[in-house]
Each structure stands twice: as C-alpha cells, then as structure tokens.
Amino acid sequence: MTVDLNSRYGLNPAHSEVVEACQIIEPCDALDMGCSNGRNALYLSQLGFDVTAIDVNPSAIHMLEDIIKQEELTNIKAEVYDINRANLDADYGFISCTVTLMFLDPARVDAVIADMQQRTKPEGYNLIVCAMDTPAYPCPINFPFTLNEGQLREFYEGWELIKYNEDVGTMHNGAQLQFATMLAQKPS
C-alpha cells in the first residue's frame, strides 16, 4: 500500500488533472514544471514514474529534496531551474505544467511551450492548466501571463487532444476564473 506522502508532509493533494491524466498514462520519465513543494512530483513518483521536478524557487526545491532524502526516494530528482530559459536537457514521456505558465515571462511562453513539445517523446503527453483572460471572464488576478480563447489549442495543432476545455474554475484562494485545461498526445 502506498503512503500518502503529500498529507504526511502537509502538502496539498496532487492536482486533479494530474491524477486524471495518470489514469491513462503509463509510468514513464516525467517532468513536473513549476513543481513548487512537489505535490505532483511526489504523487507521480508513488505511481512509479521517474520524475524530474523543476522550479525557480530554491526554498521549494530544498523542501522537496528533504522529503526525497527522508523517504529514500530513488525515482525523483528536484532541480532549481528557470522555466523561462526554455532549454530542457532531456526527453520525457509526460510533461506536466499545471498552474505554472501564468507566472512566466509572457515573452517566453511560446518558447517554453515549443521546448516542451520538442522534449516530449513520440506518443508522449503534455498536460497544461493555465489561467485565461477573456471578455466573459476577465482574470481577477494580475498574472504576468494569461491565455486567450483558443490559444492553447492552437499551440497544439497536430497533436491529439485527449482533453481540452476552457472552463471556469476556482483557485485555492477562492478566486473564480477561466482556465484552459489540456492533455495532448504527441504524434508518433
């Protein structure tokens, strides 16, 4: 039986879209982009994925490294990395980028997504959840970057969209806003 490391260390549960994606994605090399304290990375490692967790915040990475060390986890590594660099150095079967793009430099988002796509193995998956700013639902939070209607779908032209929606959701702080949610599979 797997131990729920997230609750053991006081972390939020894994993002619901990560949990849902893992119902169809077999354990593989995975990248958790913008991992924060590692809630998704720990979940993935418990399912047997070999996880690389990256975040620009050294404190968050050190916290995750402490958990990795205490739990003697061998299938997860945490690295301080600025996602704006858009220069990943390995290929992955699954790249998860939930609630991360909106904190990036808007001028770098196209390059970050192109890099994610390039570093996804054939038949691999990208999961993106990102806030939107639309006429119907102006974003109430001043994020550096938000998606427009249909923008995420356009980025993934030629990929199979396993799931795609632009639904209104609630942030952990209670704010209501529209999110683009996509799970896409790269062609072989």
Image: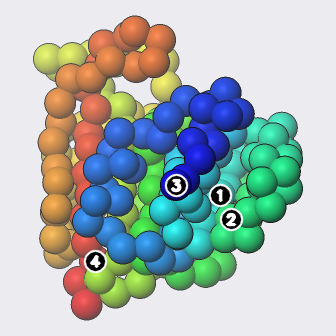
Q: Which label was assigned to residue 186?
A: 4
Q: Is mark 1 on a helix, strand or loop?
A: strand
The residue depicted at 25 percent of the width and 90 percent of the height is 188
The residue depicted at 26 percent of the width and 65 percent of the height is 24
Q: Quadrant of residue 53?
A: bottom right
Whole-number angstrom distance, CA of label 2 to CA of label 4: 24 Å
- The amino acid type found where label 4 is placed reads Lys
Q: What element carries label 4?
A: loop
Query: In this figure, which residue is indicated by the disc labeled 1?
Result: 53
Q: In this view, does 134 lie above or below 95?
A: above
Query: In this figure, which residue is indicated by the disc labeled 3?
Result: 1
Whole-number angstrom distance, CA of label 2 to CA of label 1: 7 Å
Cβ atoms under marks 2 and 4 closer than 8 Å:
no
Q: What element carries label 2?
A: strand
Q: In this view, does 7 lie above or below 49?
A: above
Cβ atoms under marks 2 and 1 closer than 8 Å:
yes
The residue depicted at 46 percent of the width and 51 percent of the height is 97
The residue depicted at 67 percent of the width and 34 percent of the height is 8
